[in-house]
């Protein structure tokens, strides 16, 4: 009984909550990601973005990347790779298109 309660509590911890990361692209600025209200541009801020993504992966194993259908895969794929290498077990892309 205690084991089941402990397991249920572990499943309800913030570490299992979904975290959202916005990803985008413009011809003028290239790829970008917004994490916790801070915008990171690639490739200029690659190291800072990698550190932020590592912190996200340590905090939550489920990460949703939010963008539109025009976001190039090179922008999305770079984020997926860093998240998975750092422990995120579920990374998905959700389109914001209407």
Image (cartoon, helix red, strand yellow):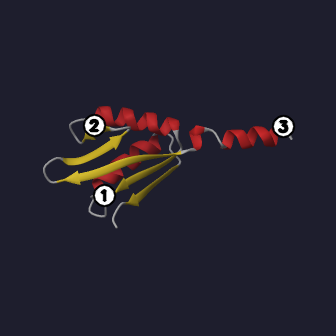
Q: Which residue carries the number 3 mark? A: 2
Q: Which residue carries the number 2 mark? A: 46
Give yes or no for contact between labels 1 and 2 (Cβ–Cβ under 8 Å). Answer: no
Q: Which residue carries the number 1 mark? A: 73
Q: How many marks?
A: 3
Say which quarter of the image contains residue 96.
bottom left
Sequence-wise first label, 2 or 3 = 3
Q: Is residue 53 above or below residue 78?
A: above
Q: Is residue 54 left or right of residue 70?
A: right
**Which of the two discs, 2 and 3, sits closer to the camera?**
3
Say which quarter of the image contains residue 97.
bottom left
**Which of the two discs, 1 and 3, sits closer to the camera?**
3
Sequence-wise first label, 1 or 2 = 2
Disc 1 from disc 3: Cα separation: 45 Å
Question: Regarding mark 2 in the picture, which secondary structure is present there?
Answer: helix
Q: Residue furthest bottom?
A: 98
Question: Regarding mark 3 in the picture, which secondary structure is present there?
Answer: helix
Measured as percent of width and height from the top left, residue 4 is found at 80, 43
Sequence-wise first label, 1 or 3 = 3
């Amino acid at each position: 009984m205690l084991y089941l309660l402990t397991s249920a509590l572990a499943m309800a911890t913030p570490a299992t909550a979904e975290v959202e990361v916005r990803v985008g692209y413009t011809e003028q600025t290239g790829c970008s990601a917004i994490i916790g209200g801070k915008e990171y541009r690639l490739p200029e801020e690659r190291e800072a973005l990698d550190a932020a993504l590592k912190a996200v992966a340590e905090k939550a194993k489920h990460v949703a990347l939010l963008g539109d259908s025009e976001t190039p895969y090179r922008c999305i794929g770079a984020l997926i790779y860093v998240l998975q290498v750092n422990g995120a077990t579920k990374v998905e892309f959700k389109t914001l298109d209407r």
